[in-house]
Amino acid sequence: MMKHKIILVLVSVFLAFAILCVSLSVTSVRVTGNRTYTAEEIEQLVFPTRMSRNSVACMIRGLMGKKRSIPFVQDYKISFLSPGEVEVIVYEKSIVGYVSYMSSRMYFDKDGIIVESANQRLPGIPEITGLHFGQIVLYRELPVENRRIFSMILNLTQTLSTFGIPADMIRYDKDLNATLNIGNVSVLLGGSNDMNGKLSELSNILPRIKDLDGTLDLSDYDPTVPNRMYSFRRR
């Protein structure tokens, strides 16, 4: 009789625990580290179904290292703040630009490694044109003729970000001279020397010409000549 009571108690405890596990659900999601996606988009990608929001199942998936693959996201971590509240910490892939290849946008990092292939265009990521390359393979280096171009692109995009200048396209010629496309404005930058000074001048000039259609020539920028006037040709 006592044995049956013990079994009944154990079964009752087990059932109560099982019901508790099934009923626990993630109801509040905080997202940090995201730039490409909104917090709502990350929440939907990480928790696409009602079952995926089960707190116990979510913990088990985390312990087993099972995570959903999200484009442009290197990794993410789910941290439980309470049984129903989590923080999703997003680690995005480092991307400096993309090239068009076979109807796709091939995004690459600072070392020229192709990290993502997609049809969508990421805001703030410029298209890089004028490069000559062979066959592109995902997660391999973009096969360009001169690898020095990657450090030049990184330096240029970082400096653009510093000055808050949004470039739609960066075009390089055979001598690695750079031209920016910003809306209907083209900006001739020339070589990679004095890039910080050139873009500092551009940040001062751009508010006055950003709604125009033409070409600004900063290729002959000289840091020793103050208050210099630059050519702007309308199209």
Image (cartoon, grey):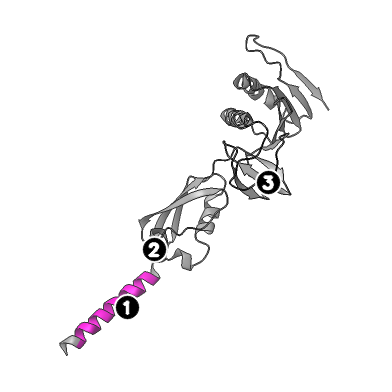
> For the residue marked with disc 1, what is the amino acid?
Leu
Distance between mark 2 and mark 3 Cα atoms: 36 Å
Which quarter of the rendered picture does the C terminus lie within? top right
The residue that label 1 is drawn on is 15
User: Callout 3: 10 Å neighbours few (<14), some, many (20+)?
Assistant: some
> For the residue marked with disc 2, what is the amino acid?
Ile
| Residue drawn at (53%, 56%) of the image | 69
Residue at disc 3, secondary structure: strand
Q: Give the magenta range.
A: 4-22
The residue that label 3 is drawn on is 105
**Above or below — where is 93 with respect to 191?**
below
- Going from N to C along the chain, the mark reached first, 2 or 1, is 1
Hey, which residue is sitting farthest right in the picture?
235
Residue at disc 2, secondary structure: helix
The residue that label 2 is drawn on is 60
Does residue 209 belong to the magenta stretch?
no
85 or 146, nearer to the observer: 146
Please tell me in which quadrant of the rendered image residue 98 appears. top right
Asked if disc 2 and disc 3 are in contact, CB closer than 8 Å, the reply is no
Return the x and y of residue 145 as percentages of the image width and height: 68, 33
